[in-house]
Image (cartoon, grey):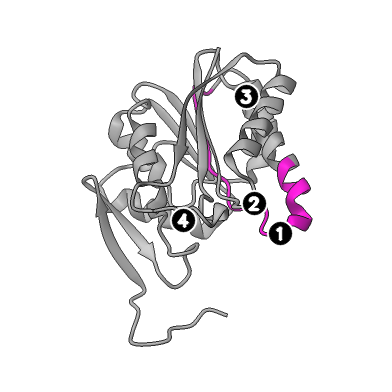
Amino acid sequence: MQQVLYGEVPEEVIVEEYGLKYAVDLHGGQKTGFFLDQRENRQIIARHAAGRTALNCYCYSATMGLCMRNAGVQTLHNVDLSEGALQLAARNYSLNEVVPGEDEFLAADVKRFLGDMPADHYDLIVLDPPKFTASKRTIDAAIKGYKHINMVALKKIKSGGLLFTFSCSGLVDMELFRKIIFYAAKDAGRDVRIVRPLSADLDHSLSIYHRENEYLKGLMLYVV
C-alpha cells in the first residue's frame, strides 16, 4: 500500500537535469517517479545519438528519448505499454518546448514490437526494462526474458549500430547479465563488441556487504 506518512505531497514536481526539465509524478509514477540512477547513462546515450535512427524501449517518461532529441537524433520512437507513461513523456516534451515527430510515442508491448519491427531500420536501440524478477523462484524466467529481447534487438539492429541494454534486477548481477548477452548475441548470429559497462551514477554508493545493492547494470554494445 502506498500512502503519505507526513505532510502533503504535490501531484507533480518539476526537476532539472543538465538543462532539461522533467515532470515527476510522485503519487502514481514508477518507484520515486524519476530514475535518478540513470542520470549519467542518459548523457552517454545522448552523446552517441546525433544523426541516428533510434528506438527507446520501455521508455516510461522518455527521459532518455528527450536527451537524444536534445542531442540531435534524426528519428526517434519511444515505446511503452503504459498510456499513462506516454502522457508523462509528452508532458516532458512540452516542458522543454520539443514537438514530437510522427509516431514518436508508441503504445505497444515491447516484446511484440521488437518481433514485428523490420530489420536494419534502427542503428541505436535502448533496452531499459522494468525489473524482471524480485525472487529466486522467477530468476529463470527473467533470464529467458532478458535473453529474448536482446537477441531480437541484436538480430534486427543495423550493422554498425549501438545497443544500450540494462537490467535493474538485483538478483541478476553483471557476470550473469554478460552471460545472457553473450548467448543472445550467439543466437542472433551477430558479432558484438562491448564498448563499456554501465551502472548507476556515482551518488548511488554501493555497500560491499550487499551485492544486490548493485542492482542497475548495463552494457554499451557495438554490433558489427
Q: Which one is in front in this view, the residue at disc 3 or the one at disc 4?
A: 4
| Label 2 with label 4: CB-CB less than 8 Å | no
User: Farthest bottom residue?
Assistant: 6
Query: Horizontal and vertical percent for residue 36?
Result: 38, 54
Q: Amino acid at mark 2?
A: Leu
- Structural distance between the alpha carbons of marks 3 and 1: 27 Å
Q: What's the residue type where badge 1 is placed?
A: Ser
The numbered dot on residue 135 is 1
- Answer with mark 3 or mark 1, whichever residue precedes in sequence: 1
Q: Residues within 10 Å of mark 1 (few under 14, many from 20)?
A: few
Q: In the figure, residue 73 lies in which quadrant? A: top left
Query: Which residue is tagged 4?
Result: 207
In this rendered view, identify the residue nearer to me: 209 or 192: 209
Residue 154 bears which disc, if any?
3
Q: Are marks 3 and 2 in contact (CB under 8 Å)?
A: no
Report x, y in % for residue 106: 53, 44
**Local SS, label 3:** helix
Disc 3 crowd, CA 10 A, few/some/many (<14, 14-19, 20+): many
Taking the spot 46% from the left edge, 36% from the top edge, the residue there is 198
Residue in the picture at 33% in, 53% down: 203
Q: Viewer-proximal residue, 137 or 109?
A: 137
Q: Which amino acid is tagged 4?
A: Ser
- State the extent of the magenta-drawn residues as a range: 122-143
Task: Compute the Cα span from label 3 to label 4.
Answer: 33 Å
* Mark sitting earlier along the chain (1/2): 1
- Tell me the CA gap for discs 1 and 2: 8 Å
The residue that mark 2 highlights is 171
Foreground: disc 2 or disc 4: 4
* Quadrant holding the C terminus: top right
Percent across and percent down for residue 128 are 53, 43
